[in-house]
Amino acid sequence: GIRLPHVENLLGLSAIQTKNFVESEVHFRRGLALKPDSGLEAYLQYNLASSQYEQDHVDEASKSLRQVSSKSLDATTQLKFHYLKALIYHRLAQDYEACSELLGSSLALSAASTDSNNPLAERYRLLFSNSVREVKSPENLEALYKDFEDHPYADLVLYELGLRAMGR
């Protein structure tokens, strides 16, 4: 029989828990095909993108993520959305965009999380640290610093600029 979009979403999430990303993608696609309301549709699209990324289908994940309005997601999922978007940028060697995504959304991370040991906060910092090293243009690094100089990660941008000035 036909299942409700909510059920397909839960089955997809269950498949993700067991690292069965092919099966999870099938459930998220079925859920989307059932024309869910816009709120659930955003979660199904995000979950689909996440599942595609885990299968190393980076271009498909990017396309799926572009279908999502992050404002339709709760605060925690919004952070995961921005993190996934930055991961995709990083994988596509668009590291300036990855850094901008992380800087722009990580302020919400600190606001949404009272737990300083939040594992997502650590993953954000690590991805940012890796991405900032890969930004090709010093002008882009300077622009990141200028746009986000009050951000807690701004020191990482300055550090990278300093290393380059010293000839690294």
Image (spheres, helix red, strand yellow):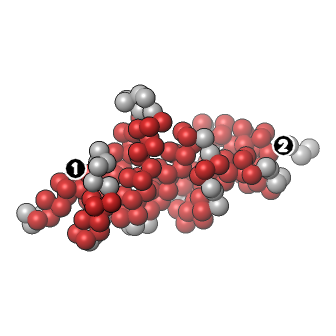
Please identify the quarter of the rendering in which residue 75 is found: top right
In the rendered structure, find residue 4 and report the number of the disc placed on it.
2
Give the position of the N terminus as an image quadrant.
Answer: top right
Instruction: Name the front one of labels 2 and 1.
Output: 1
- The image position of residue 38, as x and y in percent, is 74, 51
Give the camera-side residue of 128 and 143.
143
* Residue depicted at x 28% and y 61%: 146
Alpha-carbon neighbours of circle 1 within 10 Å: few (<14), some, or many (≥20)? Answer: few
Marks 2 and 1, the one that precedes in the sequence: 2
**Type of the residue with mark 2:** Leu
* Residue depicted at x 73% and y 46%: 40
Left or right relative to 15: residue 61: left
Give me the C-alpha separation between circle 2 and circle 1: 48 Å
Residue 82 visible? The answer is yes
* Residue depicted at x 33% and y 60%: 147
- The image position of residue 138, as x and y in percent, is 23, 69
Would you name the residue on which mark 1 appears?
155
Local SS, label 1? helix
In the rendered structure, find residue 126 and report the number of the disc placed on it.
none
* Residue depicted at x 44% and y 62%: 89
Give the camera-side residue of 47 and 82.
82
Residue 91 visible? The answer is no
Q: Residue pushed farthest left?
A: 166
**Type of the residue with mark 1:** Asp
Alpha-carbon neighbours of circle 2 within 10 Å: few (<14), some, or many (≥20)? Answer: few
Local SS, label 2? loop
- The image position of residue 103, as x and y in percent, is 38, 52
